[in-house]
Each structure stands twice: as C-alpha cells, then as structure tokens.
Amino acid sequence: MLTVPEFAKRKKQKEKITMITCYDASFARILSESPIEVLLIGDSSSMVMQGEDSTIQASPESMVFFTKSVANGTKGRKFLVSDMPFLSTRKGLRFAVDCAETLLKAGAHAVKIEGILGNEKLVSHLVESGIPVMGHLGLTPQFVNAFGGMKVQARSPEDQERLQAQARQFQDYGAFAVVLECIPSAIASKITNDLSIPTIGIGAGSGVDGQVLVLQDMLGFNPEFKPKFLRTYLDGKSLFIDAFHSFHEEVKSAHFPNEQESYL
C-alpha cells in the first residue's frame, strides 16, 4: 500500500500516481485487486450514490458511512483519502478536527480539503496532529454556487498567479499532495514544477504528477456526462443493461434457475 512519505518519492522519481473515487465495499474489493494506488472517498458520493445535484449535500455522517464501506472492502490494501464535506472546515477548529478524526477512525488514511484560504491554521493543526492532508484547488465543487456553476478556473494571469500562491501555501502548511481540478494545462504544469509535493489532476492536462477520475464516469455508467477531461474505459451502462435483460428473459422463459442451480 502507498504511504504518505512515498507520495513525494513518486514525484521525485517522476512516477505518476493513479487515483479513483470509490464509495462502497463491492467496488473497493475489486479495486483492491487492481494496480490503482489511491482511492478517494469523495463528497461526490452525494451526486453519484445519492442522486443529488452537487456535493454540498454531503455530510460528515454520510462521509463516515462511505469511508467505512470502502475501508471494509479494501481491508488495508489501498491508501484511502476522504473528503472533508461542505462547511466542515468552517465551523471552528474543534468541529473540523472532530470530523477529520471520525473519518480516520472510519478507515481513511488522509483527508482532502477544498481551498486553503481560511483553512491555513486547520491544515497545519491537522498535520501536526498526525492527520495527513491533501489539498484541492481550481474548480472546487463545494464552491459551485460562488463560481456560478462548474467552470474551468484560473484562466486569467492574475487568477493563475493567485492559484500558484495557494498551492505553495498548501505545501507550506504541510499538505502531502494537491488535487488540481479543471484548470488550464499550462498553469497546472507550472504549479507542478514549482512544488515538491505531487499534484493530482482532473481536467488539468498531462503535466501533473498523477490523475484521478470518478469511478462511475470512467466506467461509462453515465454516458450523458461528457466533460472534456473525461475518458471512458468501458461501456458499463450497456454491459449492465445487457446482463439485466438476460436475467429477465431467462426468468420469464424458466431457463433460470436450472437443475444445477436448484436444491434437490
């Protein structure tokens, strides 16, 4: 299993890091048999698993539930990162620390925090308390209302300079890695070259130190969702529907179960 100190080593050795979201024990067991190195229990669980329109509906309780589910499936075979949900870092240091504590006790090895502004003291405190922190910059979905939607960030030189400074802050306050989401590839590469900690991109080009995708998206379960950065590796929706059709027809025609599948 990948460990926190090995993230920096991977960057130094120019070895890319692979990360996939996961929310349940079934997929966690499958991913545990794959070479994928990091599983992110994202607050995207509110959208993927609960059908909400954004990530802001995720709660500390739901994040603990999904984290424990994934941890039960991996049984220590994968490095797990859990999202600190919407506003959990803004209700005081005690509340945030309690939230991070419950996520680690549920099985996470680290927490991910969106944005550094206003979270400087918290990031430092968590790291000094033994809770590894992964940062998240660029399109931070918890800020969807402030951004006016899911839009590419840091297009102007001023915004890019500001983003680069924030990435340095995450590093200075002790984060072991930073996710860069939906930003121009040139600034993502510049930030990556500027930091000693690895960057993990989603919609940030190929010049970062690793990549992350949402599991259900890359498996083609939601073919209507087609952002520019997404590559699907399976026509999952069609495969599942075909299987359901086969089951339905075999039940209707009394071909399932057969004698070998029945108790005598």
Image: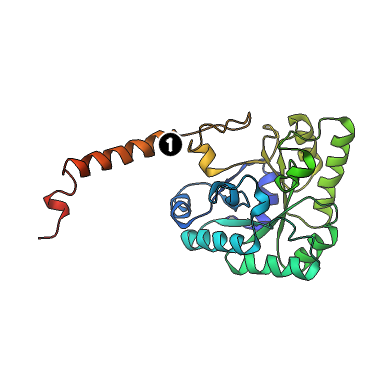
| Residue 262: percent from left, percent from top | 15, 56
How many other residues sit within 10 Å of disc 1, few (<14), some (14-19) or many (≥20)? some
| Residue 230: percent from left, percent from top | 59, 33
Foreground: 163 or 77? 163
Q: Residue at x 71, y 55 (%)?
A: 86
- Vertical arrangement, residue 80 with respect to residue 160, above or below: below
Find numbered disc 1 in the image and state the secondary structure of the residue it sits on.
helix
Q: If the image is split into quadrants, where does the C terminus sit?
A: bottom left
Q: Residue at x 54, y 38 (%)?
A: 217
Side (left or right) of 88 relative to 240: right
Side (left or right) of 200 relative to 28: right
Side (left or right) of 52 relative to 24: right
Q: Residue at x 53, y 50 (%)?
A: 49
Residue 76 seen anywhere in this rendered image of the structure: no
Image quarter for residue 59? Answer: bottom right
Q: Residue at x 81, y 34 (%)?
A: 154
Foreground: 129 or 150? 150
| Residue 127: percent from left, percent from top | 76, 63
Foreground: 145 or 226? 145
Total marks in image: 1
| Residue 248: percent from left, percent from top | 27, 41
Image quarter for residue 147? Answer: top right
Q: If the image is split into quadrants, where does the N terminus sit?
A: bottom right
Scheme of image coloration: rainbow
Q: Amino acid at mark 1?
A: Lys
Residue under pointer 1: 237
